[in-house]
Amino acid sequence: MPRDDLRRLARLWGVVLEDSVLETPTGCVAFGRRGEDCVVLKIPRPENDETHSLAALLHFAGSGAVRVLEHGPGAMLLERAIPGRPLTDLVIASCDDEATGIICDLIAAAPTRPPR
């Protein structure tokens, strides 16, 4: 079912999907392009706390986080962070201080206005 939803939303939002779809415990994700832009189409599982990520991303409004390009009930189209490097890579490489510094920079860049 999520794969069908991804295809339907891709058509609706003008996204050309890449071949792979990732199904994880937190949801379903597909990568693609909209025009020249690399994008991520994401459908979080309703029972997972990942469903709250849309509100957080809308609050950040692209400051220290990816921008929300489109959203609808239970789904979102996001700009794709490229090159994209998980902080866990730094932690695994024993670079905890560097990972912590990145998190601190993101917190400092966060909007100071209260969420809507």
Image (cartoon, grey):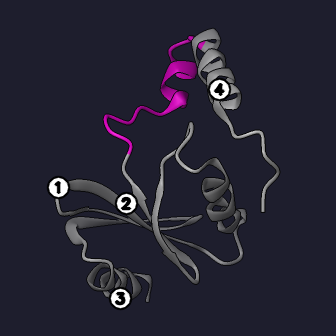
Determine if the magenta segment contains residue 10.
no
Q: CA distance from mark 1 to mark 4?
A: 29 Å
**N-term mark: 1 or 4:** 1
Name which residue lies at 32% across and 85% down. 12
Q: Which segment did they paint magenta? A: 81-95
Residue holding disc 1: 36
* Image-based side of 59 in relation to 35, left or right: right
Residues packed near mark 2 inside 10 Å, few (<14), some (14 to 19) or many (20 plus) = many
**Numbered tag placed on residue 84 in the rendering:** none
Q: Nearer the viewer, residue 47 or 98?
A: 98
**Numbered tag placed on residue 40 in the rendering:** 2
Q: CA distance from mark 2 to mark 4?
A: 22 Å
Quadrant the N terminus occupies: bottom left
Q: Quadrant of residue 6?
A: bottom left
At mark 3, the secondary structure is helix
Q: Main secondary structure of the magenta part?
A: loop
| Identity, as a three-letter code, of the amino acid under mark 2 | Val
Residue holding disc 4: 103
Residue holding disc 3: 4
Q: Look at the picture and state if 76 lies above or below 95.
A: below
Q: Nearer the viewer, mark 3 or mark 1?
A: 1
Q: Nearer the viewer, residue 91 or 102?
A: 102
Name which residue lies at 77% across and 39% down. 112
| Identity, as a three-letter code, of the amino acid under mark 1 | Glu
Q: Nearer the viewer, mark 1 or mark 4?
A: 1
* Image-based side of 24 in relation to 83, left or right: right
x%, y% of residue 87?
53, 29
Q: Quadrant of residue 108?
A: top right
Callout 2 touching callout 4 (CB < 8 Å):
no
Q: CA distance from mark 2 to mark 1?
A: 13 Å
| Identity, as a three-letter code, of the amino acid under mark 4 | Ile
